[in-house]
Image (tube, rainbow, N blue to C red):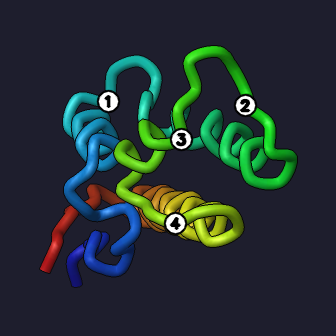
Amino acid sequence: MKNVVNFMNYPAVFNDTPFYEEFYDYLENSKGINKAEYNLIISKRDVALYVNNNMIPHAGFKITNLKKYFGIKGKGENLLNSFMEVFNQYFELKNEMIEKAKIGPVEITAF
């Protein structure tokens, strides 16, 4: 049996967005920091501040940039829920990859 991770099981992560492109580039090169994961963690703080407290988290913050980067839509609570779906699926995917890597080389597929 192959040691396979199927990206189709994570539709919020596996889509045509800058987030996915940076994540995939990291998987291919695995050098330095995972910029996609870093942006995901920082953006969780930012979107929560923006939605829950009606607060701009930092100078230069634009919610449209965050929406484009992660490929999400919505306003208010719907935006936060869409973001959290990406966040949760990413970490489920990461945990699956880590567990399968303990067994041996991991093959990534999207079928």
Where is mark 4, residue-wise?
74
Which element carries disc 1, helix, strand or loop?
A: loop
The Cα–Cα distance between marks 2 and 3, rounded to whole angstroms, is: 9 Å
Where is mark 3, residue-wise?
63
Furthest residue in direction left, as rendered: 111
The Cα–Cα distance between marks 4 and 3, rounded to whole angstroms, is: 10 Å
Q: Where is residue 2 in the image (x, y as percent from the top left)?
A: 21, 77
Three-letter code, disc 1: Ser
- Does residue 89 appear anywhere in the picture? yes
Three-letter code, disc 4: Gly
Three-letter code, disc 2: Ile
Nearer to the camera, 34 or 54: 54
- Residues at circles 2 and 1 in contact by the CB criterion of under 8 Å: no
Can you tell which mark lies on residue 30?
A: 1
- Residues at circles 4 and 3 in contact by the CB criterion of under 8 Å: no
Who comes first in sequence, dot 1 or dot 4?
1
Q: Nearer the viewer's eye, disc 3 or disc 1?
A: 3
The Cα–Cα distance between marks 2 and 4, rounded to whole angstroms, is: 17 Å
Which element carries disc 4, helix, strand or loop?
A: loop
Q: Quadrant of the N terminus?
A: bottom left
Q: Where is residue 81 in the image (x, y as percent from the top left)?
A: 63, 70
Which element carries disc 2, helix, strand or loop?
A: loop
- Residues at circles 1 and 4 in contact by the CB criterion of under 8 Å: no
Q: Quadrant of residue 107?
A: bottom left
Q: In which quarter of the image is residue 29?
A: top left
Who comes first in sequence, dot 2 or dot 4?
2
Left or right placement of residue 93 versus residue 7 in this view: right
Where is mark 2, residue-wise?
56
